[in-house]
């Protein structure tokens, strides 16, 4: 989170909003981006580690800005969070992701779709109800939707978070802990939470297999997930050596450039067709 905060600042100031006035402009534009249909989702494949079989995708938002070009989440998500615009934007992401997953299902590709949540979105009083109506509207089976939460979101107010996760779990939605290892999970709390998946953060994966500490952390996370009966996904897998290490540790799923970059829907279709039969 520290690294991302720094990156956001570095990106934002010189590249996007150079002045307070410019920042104000961007804010205003962000407010209109949904109705102007300027957001898009990319989908990054996740595969079974042992054999490369496609199992799901993670939805990643982009903003096609009419003047500034294609913006990555680092350039606008923090701003959207500051101004609560993340709530309608997040709702758009969920709807779009669920709708697309449903289309893939109908086309014979049973992929789970993972969606990143922001704190404000998750804490909104009607969040659980909105997920329920989303599932009803799109007809997506609940088990094919996975919500990604960060450790910080989970450890904030554990009893309240736990109650909310139970409600989501009751709907049949899958829950995963994003960027695991970078936050401050209390293990005793973690064991109480109805979580399905842990995602090993890219910062550890990047240094595999040679950096001793990262290797120790990655393998400890896999063991921990095992012990808790959770599945484990490694993100940001870029090299064959990283893949081999993670497979050797018993990591369940892989995501990263060695599998595929985040793809548009047509690119995803082509990628799926190039995979061995499901
Ligand atoms: P994240 O959830 O950790 O997502 C993974 C990020 O790693 C994505 O960056 C992805 O493009 C990038 N990535 C994937 N494979 C590799 C790899 O092999 N190497 C490297 N170096 N990077 C890889 P992206 O798309 O720029 O998203 C950045 C962050 O923005 C995400 O991090 C997530 O926290 C946030 N984000 C993305 N979409 C949404 C959204 O719809 N809502 C919210 N609230 N946050 C989002
Ligand atoms: Ca994520
Ligand atoms: Ca992540
Ligand atoms: Ca990450």
Image (cartoon, grey):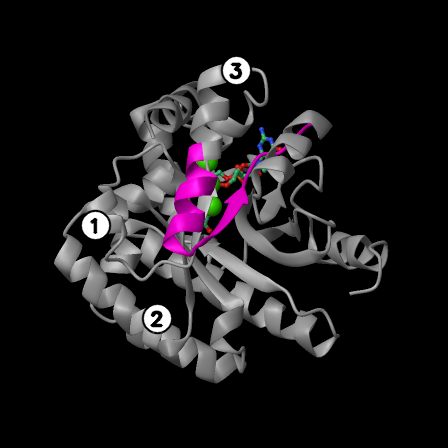
Q: CA distance from mark 3 to mark 2?
A: 37 Å
Mark 3 or mark 2: name the one nearer the start of the chain. Answer: 2
Q: CA distance from mark 2 to mark 1?
A: 17 Å
Mark 3 vs mark 2: give the one in front: 3
Mark 1 or mark 3: name the one nearer the start of the chain. Answer: 1
Residue 169, numbered label = 2
Position of residue 204 measured from the top left corner of the image (x, y, whole percent): 48, 27
Q: Which quadrant of the view contains residue 239?
A: top right
The reply to whether callout 1 and callout 3 are in contact (CB within 8 Å) is no
Please state the extent of the stretch shown in magenta in the rendering. Answer: 220-239
Categorize mark 2 by other alpha carbons within 10 Å: few (<14), some (14-19), many (20+). some
Mark 2 vs mark 1: give the one in front: 1
Position of residue 277 measured from the top left corner of the image (x, y, whole percent): 83, 63
Q: Is residue 230 magenta?
A: yes
Position of residue 236 measured from the top left corner of the image (x, y, whole percent): 58, 34
The reply to whether callout 2 and callout 1 are in contact (CB within 8 Å) is no
37 in relation to 145, above or below: above
The residue that mark 3 highlights is 211
The residue drawn where x is 34% and y is 52% is: 86
Q: Is mark 2 within 8 Å of ligand 2?
A: no
Q: Secondary structure at mark 2?
A: helix
Q: Secondary structure at mark 1?
A: helix
Residue 189, numbered label = 1
Q: Secondary structure at mark 3?
A: loop
């Amino acid at each position: 989170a520290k690294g991302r905060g720094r990156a956001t600042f570095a990106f934002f100031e010189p590249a996007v909003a150079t002045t307070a006035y410019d920042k104000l402009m961007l804010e205003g534009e962000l407010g209109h981006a949904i109705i102007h249909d300027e957001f898009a989702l990319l989908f990054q494949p996740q595969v079974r580690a042992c054999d490369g079989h496609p199992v799901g995708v993670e939805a990643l938002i982009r903003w096609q800005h009419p003047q500034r070009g294609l913006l990555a989440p680092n350039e606008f998500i923090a701003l959207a969070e500051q101004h609560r615009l993340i709530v309608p934007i997040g709702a758009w992401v969920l709807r779009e992701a669920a709708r697309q997953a449903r289309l893939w299902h109908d086309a014979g590709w049973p992929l789970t779709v993972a969606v990143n949540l922001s704190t404000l979105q998750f804490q909104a009083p009607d969040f659980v109800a909105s997920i329920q109506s989303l599932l009803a509207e799109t007809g997506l089976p609940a088990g094919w939707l996975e919500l990604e939460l960060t450790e910080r979101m989970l450890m904030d107010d554990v009893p309240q978070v736990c109650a909310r996760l139970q409600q989501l779990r009751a709907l049949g939605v899958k829950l995963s802990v994003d960027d695991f290892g970078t936050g401050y999970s209390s293990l005793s709390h973690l064991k109480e939470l109805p979580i399905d998946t842990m995602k090993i953060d890219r910062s550890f994966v990047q240094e595999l297999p040679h950096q001793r500490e990262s290797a120790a952390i990655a393998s400890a996370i896999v063991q921990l997930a095992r012990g808790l009966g959770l599945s484990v996904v490694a993100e940001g897998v870029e090299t064959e050596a990283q893949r081999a290490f993670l497979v050797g540790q018993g990591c369940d799923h892989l995501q990263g450039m060695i599998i595929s970059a985040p793809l548009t829907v047509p690119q995803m279709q082509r990628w799926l067709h190039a995979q061995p039969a499901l």
